[in-house]
C-alpha cells in the first residue's frame, strides 16, 4: 500500500464516504461505473475488482472475458453533487488482464501507450479543450421537441439567464473536483454554452473531460434541463465541437515555441501540424465518431471541414491562435474538428500520434490558408490543394480502415472493434427513414 | 660514481630511460644530492609506479621549490627508512595495519548509515613525507603538474602526520567547513551564502580548496602498500569531499541571486557512487534535487528559483575558469530522466515514484543520501521514498525488469573496449554491484539489516545475515576492491574519467606497480584482471543460487543454506512461481552421497539461473528432475553437462521454454548429446534419414518384430532434433520444409515398403502385381506441415502387364489400408495420421485407384476444388516412373491452358466465402484463428492457388507446390507487387511458426488450440519467448499477429475476390 492509496483510505474515513465509484470507459467513450463500499477499497487497490469484460463494449476478447479494474488513487475525488455527508467518491481505473497486464482494449491504456511513445521521443503532451454543449428544457422523452433554454448569441450576457446559473453551478462543482476552468461563456447557438478546461497533460485532460460530461449532466438534471454534447442537435444552428489546443513540451520548455519564427512556431510545431493535416482523414472516424458528427462538420455554421491550416483563420482545420509575445510557453495549435462526443482517450491518442508522425518523418507543412476556405469555390480549393475531411461516417471509416497509423495507435484489438462498431452504426443509420425524406411523401 | 654502476642501478630500479635519468639526477636543482643520497633516492624511486615520471616531476618541482632538494637530501640522510615505504613497511610501529582500513566496510559499519564514529582513527599508513611525494609523482602526471603550478601544496603531501580526510561524518563536517569557508560562506549558517562571487574568484577558491583535500586523499592512497585494504576509506573520503564541494557550489550559486534564493529550500541528494560512499577519483557526481518553498513563498515562485540554483550549482563545478573544472554534476537519475524538470518538490517526486517509476529507478534510490543543501528536506525525502524501495520487489514487472537490468549490465560495451573495460560488461564492476543490489532488493523488504547503500557494506551485511556464503562474499568483495583500485589508479594518472585499461605495455607496467599487483608486471596484471572477471561471473551464481541448496548439499563449511522463507523470497524474486515445489526438487536433486548428487550440487546453482531466464522455471526444474531420474546413472549424461557449458545452458533453455522438447528429450537420451554440437542439430537430408530407416527396418524382418515401430522411431528422432533446434533458433519457418515434412515423408515411404510386403504375403502372391505410388497432397505436398499436422496423401497404382486387374486392385487396396494403420495406430511411438480424404469423390470414392481410373475420372468430372487440390500434389514414395506419369496426367488439370474459366473462378470464390462464413469454429474470434481466421493460412493459400490456377500455364515458374514459392513466383511473374506478396508471406510465416510454437510450448500435438493464437496468457507468454520475443513482450506478439493478418487480409480481398 503506497502513500497515495493510504491517503485515499484516510480521506474516505474522514469524509465519511459511503460509496466509491470506480470509473472507466468503453471503446466508444461511454462512462462505466462500479460502486463499491469503502471496506472493499483496500482489496481493490491491491488486487483490483474483477468484472466480466465481454459485456462492456469492445473491452475484451471473447476467449478471455475476465478483466480487472484497478483504481488509480491519484484520480480520487469526492463527487460533490452527492452531498457532503455520506458522500460518494470516484476514481478512474486502469483495466488489467487477470495476470496484471494492462488490457490492450482499455482506452486509458491506449492513450498511455501513445504518451509513452511521445515520452520516448522526449515529449510530454499538453492539451486544452473547449467543450461546447447545448442546454434544453428538460426532455421527458426522446420525442419531445428541443427547446433551447434561451435565445442569446455569442458572448451574450443573458440577464438572469438560466445558462448563467447553470455555468456557475457546473464550474463550482468542477473546481471543487480539482478541475480548473479557464473560461466560460455563452456560445453562438441558442442555449449553447462553452466551458474551457485548463491546460493539462493529456491523460488528465481525458479524465477531466469524462468527469466534465458527468458534471454537466448532473447539474442539468438538478436544474431541470437536459444538457447534450450531441455534435449537431439543431439544424441551422451551430454544432457543438471541442476545439482542442495542443502542444508538446520538452521538459519545461515548449517545443512548439521558437522566438522570432513565423507565428513563433518551431520546426517541431510545423511538422506536428503537417502530421495532423496529412492524417486528418484517417483519424476523423475517431475524433468525430458518430453519424451525427458529420452533420456538424458539413451542416454549415462554421465547422472546420477542409484540411488546411491558418493563423486566426476560423475556417481552417488547424488554427494557430494569436500569441502573446511574452508568453512563449503558450504557443500551441488548435485542432478544430474534434467534437465532444468523442472518446477523449482515443481522440487525444490519435491526434498525438498523427502530429508525432509528422515530427518523426519531418513532414513539410503546406502553405498557410489565408482565405476563408468556405468562401472559395470547389475548383479554387482544388487549385490550392485543400482536401475535404470525410463527408460521412462511412467515408471516415473507409479512410481509417487503411490507416496503419490509427491501427498502431489504437492497437489491433481496439482498431478492429471500433471499425466493426462504426460499420454497424452506419448500417443502422442507413436503415432509417428520416423526417426529411418523409417531408416529400406527398410530392413523390 | 662510475656511469656503468649508475646505469645498472637505474635499470634495476625500473627506469626505462636510464641515460635521461642520470642527467636528471645530476640536475643542480637536486642540490645536496651527494652519492649516498642519490643512491637512496634511486632506491626510493624504484618503489614507485613510474620512476622516470617521478624523477622528472621531482626535478621540475625542485626547480621551483628550492628547499625540496635539501629536504630530500636531508630526508635521505637522516634515515633510509623514511624514503622507502618498502623498507619501512614490514609491520613496523609507525605503519598502522592497513587491515584497519578494510574494517570500515568489512566490519559491517556503514559510512552511509552513520555507523562510523567521529573518533575513528585514520588508519592510512604513516609513510614518510618524501616517500609519499615520490609515490604520488610516480603514479600521476596530473598531480606532478599540479604541484609545479601550486608549489605551496607540496606541504600537504610532505606532512606525514596530517590525517587525510576519511569517510566518517566528522570528516564530512570538516570538509564542508573547509570548502564553505574557502568561498567565505558561514558553515554554521542555516543557509550558507558565499561572500565571494563566482566571477570574483569564488569558483577558483572552491576548486583550490577541493584539490587541496583531494591531494591529501590521493597522497595517502598512493603511498599505501595495500591500496585494496584502504579502498573503502578512499571511496568514502571522495564522496564526502564531493558533497562538501556541492555545498560550496550551492553557496556560490545562492550568491548569484539578488535575494540569495531566500524563498527556496533546496536539498541535494547524492545517488550512485556518491550516495553509496564509494566514489571514484573522477566521475560524474549523480544527484537529485528536491526543493520546497519557504513559508510565505508560493510553489510557483519557488520552483523557477530552485531550478536556477541547481543549474548554477552544476555550472560552478563545470564552467571554464583558471582552475580546472571539478566534474560533471549529473541529475539524470531524476524522475523522467533528462526529460523531466531538473528540480521537483517532494510531493512531485512522490507522485512520480508512486505512479511511473521502474524497478531500476527504485534500485537507484537504494543509494540516495543527503549530500548538500537543506538536510531536513533531504531527510523528509529519504523518509518518504526509502520505504518504497523495499516494496519494489512486489511490483508487477520486478522479475522482467531486473532481468532486463542484468542484460544491460552485459550489453552496452563497444567490442573494441570489451577487453579493457573495468566497469561495464560481464565480470565488471557493474556486474558486482548488480549482484549485490539484486540480493538486497529481494531480501531487503523484510530485513532492514541489509539496507546498505555501500556495496562492500551491503555485501558484509548480506554475509552477516546469512544470505550468502562467507567465502564467496569475501571473494566477491576482493574482486570488487581489485577492480576499483585498478579504476582509481587508471584515473589518478591524468585525473581523467576513464574505465579502460591502457593498451600501452609501459603504461600497463606502471599500472601494475601503482596497484601493487604481485611482481608489478604487466602480464601479471592482465592475468589477474582476467581471472577476476571470470570469478565475478561465477560468483553471481554462487552467491545467488548456491544458498538455495539444502544444508546437506553444502560444498564447504562456509556455504550457507537459506531457511525456507528466505529461499522462497529469492526464488520468487527471480521468477519461480511455486518456490515451495522448487525447493523440494532442489533437495531431491542434490541430497545424497551418489556421484549424481555430487555433480548436481555443482551444476544446479548455474542451472537454476538459466531456468529462471526462460518462461517456465518451475516446469524446467521438474523436467530436469525427470531427466535426471531417468538418465542420472548414465555415465556420459552428467559428465557432458558438467564439462560442456554450452550443452548445459541449452538444456536449461529448452527445458524452461518448451514442454514438447522437454518431453521428447526425456524419451530420447541420445538427444542430450546433440546439444553439444550444432552439426547434430541441423536437419538431416531426407536421403540420410531414409537410409537409416531402411537399415533399421531391414534388421526387423522376423515375424512379430513390428518393423513399423522402427519407421516411427526414426520420425520421432528427427522431430526431436527439429524441436530442439527450433527452441534454440526462434522456431524458423524453414523447419517445416527441412525437417518436419521430410520426417513424415520418410515415415510414409517406410510404411509403404512394409505394407507392400505384407499385402503380397497376405494375398499369397509371388511378386507384386502392380506399381504403387503415394502422392502427397495439401500442406505435405507443399512440404509445409507442422508438428501437429496430418499427412494428406492420395494412393495410385498401375497393374503390371499381365497381372490380374482384380488381384492388383485388391493388393493395392490392402497396401493403401495398411499404410495409415501402420503409422496411425497407438503405441509407444508417436502416431502420424495419414489422411486420403482429398482423393476423387472424397470419402465416398475408392481409397486407391489405378492411373487409368484417375485419368478417366478427371477427364469426366474434374471440379474446381479438385484442380485446386492437385496444385499441391507431389509424389513422395513408391514407383518413380508412375509418379512421372501421374504428374503428366494432372499437370493439364491444375495448370489449365489460359487459366480457369469465369464460371469456375466464380465458384472458387463462392466456396471460399462460404467456408469463411461456416467453417470458423465457435468461440474463437475471427482475428485469432491462425488457419481459417481473417488473414490466416487459408486466406494466403487460396490467394496463391487462385493465381496458380489462372496463370501457371502462362508462367511456368508458378508450377510449384509450396505457398511461399508460389508467392515469390507470382512476384516474378508480375502478378503480385512485392508489397502484396510481402504482406501475404509475413502472415503465412507467422501463422506457421505460431502453430509450431503452440505445440512446442504446450506439448499438445492435437486439438483445436494449435490453430489459434493462444488465448491463455501463460501459453501466449511461452509462445512469444519461443518466437524470440523478449520477456515481457508477449503483447507485441499478439499485436504483430493481428497486424500481419489484417494486412494479409486486405491484400487477399483485393487479389482473391478481385
Image (cartoon, rainbow, N blue to C red):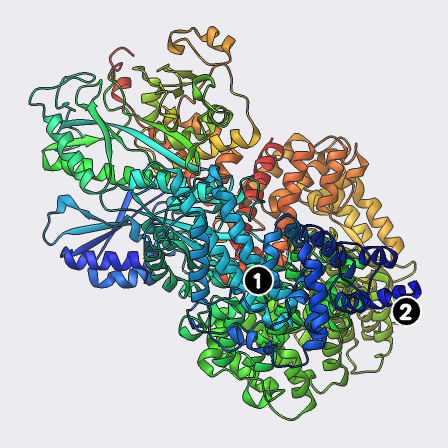
Q: Is residue B16 left or right of residue B30?
A: right
Secondary structure, mark 2, is loop
Q: Nearer the viewer, residue B1053 or B209?
A: B209
Residue at 46% across, 14% down: A368
Residue A410 horizontal/vertical position (percent): 45, 40
Q: Residue furthest left?
A: A160
Q: Is residue B613 visible from the viewing direction of this image?
A: yes
Q: Chain of mark 2?
A: B
Pointer 2: what residue?
B767
Q: Nearer the viewer, residue B1031 or B284?
A: B284
Quadrant of image for the C terminus of chain B: top right
Q: Are marks 2 and 1 on the same chain?
A: yes
Dots 2 and 1: beta carbons under 8 Å? no
Pointer 1: what residue?
B217
Q: Residue furthest bottom?
A: B593
Task: Name above or below for residue A141 compared with residue B592.
Answer: above
Amino acid at each position: 500500500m503506497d502513500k497515495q492509496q493510504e491517503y485515499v483510505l484516510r480521506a474516505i474515513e474522514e469524509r465519511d464516504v459511503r460509496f466509491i465509484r470506480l470509473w472507466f470507459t468503453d471503446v466508444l467513450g461511454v462512462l462505466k461505473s462500479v460502486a463499491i463500499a469503502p471496506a472493499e477499497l483496500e482489496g481493490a487497490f491491491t488486487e483490483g475488482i474483477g468484472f466480466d469484460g465481454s459485456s462492456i463494449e469492445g473491452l475484451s476478447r471473447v476467449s478471455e472475458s475476465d478483466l480487472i479494474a484497478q483504481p488509480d488513487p491519484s484520480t480520487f475525488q469526492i463527487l460533490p453533487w452527492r452531498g457532503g455527508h455520506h458522500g460518494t467518491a470516484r476514481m478512474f481505473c486502469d483495466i488489467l488482464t487477470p495476470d496484471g497486464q494492462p488490457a490492450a482494449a482499455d482506452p486509458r491504456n491506449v492513450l498511455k501507450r501513445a504518451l509513452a511513445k511521445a515520452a520516448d521521443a522526449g515529449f510530454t503532451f499538453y492539451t486544452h479543450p473547449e467543450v461546447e454543449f447545448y442546454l434544453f428544457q428538460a426532455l421527458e422523452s426522446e420525442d419531445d421537441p428541443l427547446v433551447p433554454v434561451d435565445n442569446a448569441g455569442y458572448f451574450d450576457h443573458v440577464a438572469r439567464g438560466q445558462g448563467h446559473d447553470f455555468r456557475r453551478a457546473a464550474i463550482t462543482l468542477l473546481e471543487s473536483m480539482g478541475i480548473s476552468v479557464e473560461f466560460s461563456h455563452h456560445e453562438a447557438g441558442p442555449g449553447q454554452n462553452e466551458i474551457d478546461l485548463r491546460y493539462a497533460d493529456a491523460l488528465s485532460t481525458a479524465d477531466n473531460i469524462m468527469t466534465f460530461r458527468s458534471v454537466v449532466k448532473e447539474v442539468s438534471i438538478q436544474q431541470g434541463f437536459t444538457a447534450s454534447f450531441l455534435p449537431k442537435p439543431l439544424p441551422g444552428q451551430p454544432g457543438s465541437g471541442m476545439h482542442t489546443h495542443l502542444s508538446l513540451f520538452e521538459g519545461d520548455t515548449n517545443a512548439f515555441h521558437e522566438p522570432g519564427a513565423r507565428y513563433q512556431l518551431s520546426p517541431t510545431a510545423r511538422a506536428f501540424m503537417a502530421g495532423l493535416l496529412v492524417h486528418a482523414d484517417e483519424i476523423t472516424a475517431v475524433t468525430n465518431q458518430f453519424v451525427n458528427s458529420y452533420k456538424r462538420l458539413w451542416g454549415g455554421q462554421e465547422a472546420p471541414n477542409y484540411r488546411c491550416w491558418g493563423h486566426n483563420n476560423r475556417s481552417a482545420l488547424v488554427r494557430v491562435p494569436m500569441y502573446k509575445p511574452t508568453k512563449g510557453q503558450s504557443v500551441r495549435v488548435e485542432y478544430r474538428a474534434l467534437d465532444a462526443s468523442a472518446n477523449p482517450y482515443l481522440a487525444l491518442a490519435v491526434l498525438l500520434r498523427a502530429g508525432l508522425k509528422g515530427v518523426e518523418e519531418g513532414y513539410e507543412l503546406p502553405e498557410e490558408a489565408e482565405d476563408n476556405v468556405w468562401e472559395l469555390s470547389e475548383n479554387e480549393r482544388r487549385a490550392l490543394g485543400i482536401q475535404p475531411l470525410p463527408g460521412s461516417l462511412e467515408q471516415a471509416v473507409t479512410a481509417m480502415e487503411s490507416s496503419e497509423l490509427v491501427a498502431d495507435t489504437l492497437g489491433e484489438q481496439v482498431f478492429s472493434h471500433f471499425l466493426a462498431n462504426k460499420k454497424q452504426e452506419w448500417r443502422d443509420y442507413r436503415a432509417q427513414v428520416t423526417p426529411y425524406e418523409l417531408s416529400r411523401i406527398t410530392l413523390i | 660514481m662510475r656511469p656503468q654502476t649508475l646505469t645498472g642501478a637505474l635499470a634495476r630500479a625500473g627506469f626505462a630511460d636510464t641515460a635521461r635519468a642520470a642527467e636528471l639526477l645530476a640536475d643542480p636543482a637536486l642540490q645536496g644530492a651527494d652519492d649516498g643520497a642519490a643512491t637512496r633516492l634511486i632506491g626510493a624511486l624504484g618503489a614507485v609506479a613510474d620512476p622516470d615520471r617521478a624523477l622528472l616531476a621531482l626535478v621540475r618541482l625542485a626547480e621551483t621549490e628550492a628547499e625540496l632538494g635539501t629536504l630530500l637530501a636531508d630526508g635521505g640522510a637522516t634515515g633510509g627508512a623514511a624514503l622507502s615505504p618498502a623498507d619501512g613497511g614490514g609491520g613496523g610501529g609507525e605503519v598502522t595495519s592497513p587491515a584497519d582500513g578494510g574494517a570500515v566496510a568489512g566490519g559491517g559499519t556503514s559510512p552511509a548509515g552513520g555507523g562510523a564514529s567521529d573518533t575513528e582513527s585514520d588508519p592510512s599508513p604513516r609513510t614518510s613525507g618524501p616517500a609519499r611525494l615520490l609515490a604520488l609523482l610516480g603514479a600521476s602526471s596530473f598531480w606532478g603538474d599540479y604541484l609545479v603550478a601550486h608549489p605551496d601544496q607540496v606541504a600537504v603531501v610532505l606532512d606525514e602526520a596530517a590525517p587525510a580526510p576519511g569517510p566518517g561524518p566528522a570528516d564530512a563536517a570538516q570538509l564542508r567547513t573547509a570548502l564553505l569557508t574557502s568561498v567565505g560562506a558561514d558553515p554554521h549558517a542555516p543557509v550558507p551564502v558565499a561572500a565571494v562571487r563566482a566571477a570574483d574568484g569564488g569558483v577558483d577558491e572552491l576548486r583550490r580548496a577541493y584539490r587541496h583535500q583531494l591531494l591529501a586523499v590521493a597522497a595517502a592512497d598512493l603511498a599505501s602498500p595495500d591500496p585494496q585494504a584502504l579502498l573503502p576509506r578512499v571511496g568514502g573520503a571522495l564522496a564526502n569531499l564531493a558533497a562538501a564541494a556541492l555545498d560550496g557550489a550551492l553557496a556560490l550559486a545562492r550568491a548569484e541571486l539578488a535575494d540569495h534564493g531566500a524563498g527556496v529550500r533546496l536539498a541535494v541528494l547524492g545517488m550512485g557512487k556518491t550516495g553509496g560512499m564509494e566514489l571514484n577519483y573522477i566521475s560524474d557526481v549523480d544527484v537529485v534535487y528536491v526543493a520546497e518553498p519557504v513559508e510565505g513563498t508560493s510553489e510557483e515562485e519557488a520552483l523557477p528559483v530552485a531550478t536556477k540554483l541547481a543549474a548554477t550549482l552544476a555550472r560552478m563545478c563545470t564552467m571554464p575558469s583558471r582552475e580546472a573544472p571539478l566534474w560533471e554534476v549529473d541529475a539524470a537519475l531524476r524522475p523522467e530522466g533528462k526529460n523531466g524538470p531538473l528540480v521537483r518538490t517532494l510531493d512531485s517526486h512522490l507522485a512520480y515514484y508512486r505512479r511511473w517509476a521502474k524497478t531500476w529507478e527504485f534500485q537507484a534510490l537504494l543509494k540516495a543520501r543527503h549530500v548538500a543543501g537543506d538536510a531536513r528536506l533531504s531527510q523528509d525525502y529519504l523518509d518518504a521514498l526509502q520505504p518504497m524501495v523495499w516494496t519494489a520487489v512486489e511490483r508487477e514487472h520486478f522479475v522482467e525488469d531486473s532481468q532486463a537490468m542484468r542484460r544491460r549490465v552485459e550489453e552496452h560495451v563497444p567490442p573494441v573496449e570489451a577487453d579493457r573495460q573495468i566497469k561495464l560488461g560481464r565480470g565488471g564492476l557493474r556486474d558486482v554491484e548488480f549482484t549485490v543490489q539484486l540480493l538486497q532488493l529481494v531480501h531487503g523488504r523484510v530485513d532492514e539489516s541489509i539496507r546498505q547503500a555501500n556495496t562492500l557494506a551491503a555485501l558484509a551485511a548480506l554475509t552477516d545475515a546469512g544470505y550468502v556464503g562467507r567465502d564467496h562474499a569475501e571473494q566477491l568483495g576482493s574482486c570488487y576492491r581489485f577492480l576499483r583500485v585498478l579504476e582509481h589508479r587508471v584515473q589518478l594518472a591524468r585525473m581523467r574519467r576513464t574505465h579502460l585499461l591502457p593498451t600501452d605495455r609501459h603504461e600497463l607496467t606502471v599500472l601494475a606497480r601503482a596497484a601493487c599487483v604481485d611482481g608489478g608486471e604487466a602480464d601479471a596484471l592482465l592475468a589477474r584482471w582476467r581471472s577476476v572477471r571470470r570469478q565475478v561471473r561465477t560468483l553471481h551464481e554462487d552467491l545467488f543460487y548456491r544458498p538455495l541448496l539444502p544444508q546437506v548439499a553444502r560444498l564447504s563449511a562456509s556455504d550457507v543454506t537459506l531457511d525456507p522463507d528466505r529461499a522462497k523470497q529469492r526464488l520468487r524474486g527471480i521468477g519461480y512461481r511455486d518456490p515451495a515445489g522448487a525447493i523440494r526438487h532442489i533437495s531431491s536433486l542434490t541430497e545424497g552421497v551418489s556421484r549424481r548428487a555430487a555433480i548436481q550440487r555443482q551444476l544446479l546453482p548455474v542451472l537454476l539461473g538459466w531456468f529462471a531466464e526462460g518462461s517456465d522455471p518451475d516446469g524446467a526444474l521438474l523436467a530436469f528432475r525427470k531427466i535426471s531420474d531417468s538418465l542420472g546413472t548414465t555415465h556420459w549424461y552428467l559428465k557432458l553437462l558438467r564439462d560442456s557449458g554450452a550443452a548445459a545452458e541449452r538444456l536449461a533453455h529448452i527445458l524452461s521454454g518448451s514442454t514438447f522438447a522437454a518431453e521428447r528429450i526425456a524419451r530420447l537420451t541420445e538427444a542430450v548429446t546433440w546439444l553439444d554440437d550444432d552439426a547434430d542439430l541441423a536437419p538431416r537430408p531426407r536421403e540420410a534419414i531414409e537410409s537409416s530407416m531402411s537399415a533399421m527396418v531391414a534388421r526387423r524382418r522376423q515375424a512379430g518384430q513390428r518393423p513399423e515401430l522402427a519407421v516411427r522411431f526414426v520420425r520421432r528422432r528427427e522431430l526431436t532434433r527439429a524441436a530442439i533446434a527450433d527452441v534454440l533458433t526462434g522456431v524458423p519457418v524453414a523447419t517445416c520444409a527441412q525437417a518436419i515434412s521430410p520426417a513424415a515423408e520418410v515415415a510414409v515411404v517406410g510404411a509403404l515398403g512394409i505394407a507392400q510386403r505384407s499385402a503380397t504375403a497376405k494375398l499369397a502372391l509371388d511378386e507384386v502385381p502392380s506399381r504403387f505410388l503415394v502422392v502427397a497432397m495439401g500442406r505435405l505436398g507443399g512440404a509445409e506441415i507442422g508438428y501437429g499436422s496430418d499427412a494428406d496423401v492420395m494412393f495410385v497404382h498401375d497393374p503390371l502387364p499381365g497381372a490380374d486387374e482384380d488381384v492388383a486392385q485388391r493388393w493395392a487396396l490392402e497396401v493403401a489400408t495398411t499404410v495409415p494403420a501402420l503409422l496411425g495406430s497407438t503405441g509407444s511411438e508417436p502416431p502420424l495420421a495419414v489422411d486420403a480424404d482429398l482423393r476423387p469423390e472424397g470419402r465416398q470414392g475408392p481409397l486407391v485407384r489405378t492411373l487409368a481410373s484417375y485419368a478417366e475420372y478427371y477427364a469426366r468430372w474434374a471440379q474446381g476444388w479438385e484442380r485446386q487440390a492437385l496444385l499441391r500434389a507431389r509424389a513422395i514414395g513408391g514407383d518413380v516412373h508412375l509418379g512421372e506419369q501421374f504428374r503428366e496426367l494432372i499437370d493439364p488439370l491444375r495448370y489449365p491452358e489460359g487459366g480457369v474459366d469465369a464460371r469456375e473462378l466464380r465458384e472458387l470464390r463462392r466456396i471460399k466465402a462460404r467456408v469463411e462464413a461456416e467453417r470458423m469454429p465457435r468461440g474463437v474470434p475471427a482475428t485469432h484463428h491462425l488457419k481459417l481466421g481473417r488473414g490466416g493460412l487459408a486466406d494466403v493459400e487460396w490467394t496463391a492457388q487462385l493465381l496458380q490456377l489462372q496463370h501457371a500455364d502462362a508462367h511456368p515458374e508458378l508450377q510449384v507446390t509450396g505457398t511461399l514459392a508460389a508467392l515469390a513466383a507470382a512476384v516474378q511473374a508480375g502478378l503480385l507487387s512485392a508489397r502484396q506478396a510481402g504482406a501475404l508471406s509475413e502472415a503465412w510465416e507467422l501463422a506457421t511458426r505460431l502453430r509450431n510454437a503452440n505445440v512446442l510450448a504446450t506439448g499438445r500435438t492435437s486439438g483445436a488450440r494449435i490453430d489459434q493464437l493462444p488465448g491463455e496468457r501463460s501459453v501466449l507468454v511461452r509462445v512469444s519467448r519461443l518466437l524470440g520475443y523478449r520477456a515481457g513482450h508477449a503483447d507485441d506478439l499478439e499485436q504483430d499477429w493481428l497486424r500481419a493478418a489484417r494486412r494479409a487480409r486486405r491484400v487477399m480481398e483485393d487479389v482473391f475476390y478481385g
